[in-house]
Amino acid sequence: MNKTTNLNQNKTAYSGVKGAFAHIAARKAFPDNEHIACAGFEEAYNAVVNGKCESAVLPIENSYAGEVGQVIDLILNGGLVIDGIISCKISQNLLGIKGAKINDIKKVISHSHALAQCEGYIREHGFEEVLAQNTALAAKEVSELNDIHSAAIASKETADLYGLEILEHNINAMHDNTTRFAILRKEYSDSDNAAGRDNFILMFTVNDEPGALAKAIAVISEFGFNMKVLRSRPSHQKAWEYYFYVEANGNIDTAEGKHMLQKLSEVCNLVKIAGKFN
């Protein structure tokens, strides 16, 4: 339970509108909270920074389309911590206005990740792709267009919300299509027990010298931490400069964890613990 007492402790921000997968994830993580729709990732993130919401639920990775780079960058450059990870199975559906048939559809509207998840289906049918900020807004746009030649790729929940029909279910390439969402807060929800969490997320940049990344990886392994994820992202500060994102098993607050961080700082320009979770 969050110890912070403020008027916004029961508000959770998400990117999109009702029916978006982030909204579904926010309801799953905080079923009793008020869920606040935001126009984009940064607005949802800043809703917590500015105290409008106590938490935010934002996507960090899809099992098919990969990382959500904009959110990872926000986490690196901001002050919020990842207080938990929630996984949601994603089922993409082809939604059209009432009376439309699959053969009528000429273009599909959706978020870039949803389009990527359904690229085989889109290519097979020869649909034109149109980008939307998120899947629920795509469904809303199709509803407003009221055109039998336009369809959205979105959740089944949006069909009910915007009066659309599901023309075809589960059109994503992977049937085990899962998105992982980060729960972001200013501080850990149970700071007394945060030190007992057995997974952590680390971000770092290495010194510009031969073998620097290999040394950093060796340090993490040396102290018995099992890396599950290692990815690089452009720093956006200097051309061809990157930062690294690591998810690992283990308690970062143990003596071994503290010693590992100390040694890691010797071969890295920046070391940041971005989150701890079970």
Image (tube, rainbow, N blue to C red):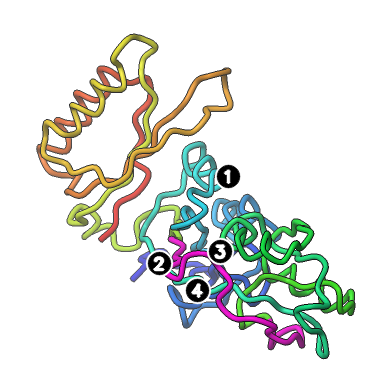
Q: Quadrant of residue 83?
A: bottom left
* Circle nearer the N terminus (1, 2): 1
CB under 8 Å between callouts 1 and 3?
no
Quadrant of the image containing the C terminus: bottom left
Residue position marked by numbered label 1 in the rendering: 70
Q: CA distance from mark 4 to mark 3?
A: 8 Å
In the image, which disc is placed on residue 87? 2
- Compared with 270, 176 (above or below) is below
Q: Position of residue 190 (x, y in %)?
A: 29, 63
Q: Which residues are magenta?
A: 159-180
Asked which quadrant contains residue 202, the reply is: top left
Which residue shows up at 17% across the image and 56% down it?
Answer: 196
- Distance from the alpha carbon under mark 1 to that under mark 4: 26 Å
Residue 53 is labelled as 3
Would you call the spot at circle 1 few (<14 residues within 10 Å), some (14-19), or many (20 or more)? few
- What's under tag 4, amino acid-wise? Asn
Q: CA distance from mark 1 to mark 2?
A: 19 Å
Residue 66: % across, % down: 48, 50
Q: Residue furthest top?
A: 209
> Which residue corresponds to mark 4?
10
Q: Is residue 55 above or below residue 244?
A: below
Type of residue at label 2?
Ser
- Mark 3: secondary structure: loop
Q: Is residue 277 magenta?
A: no
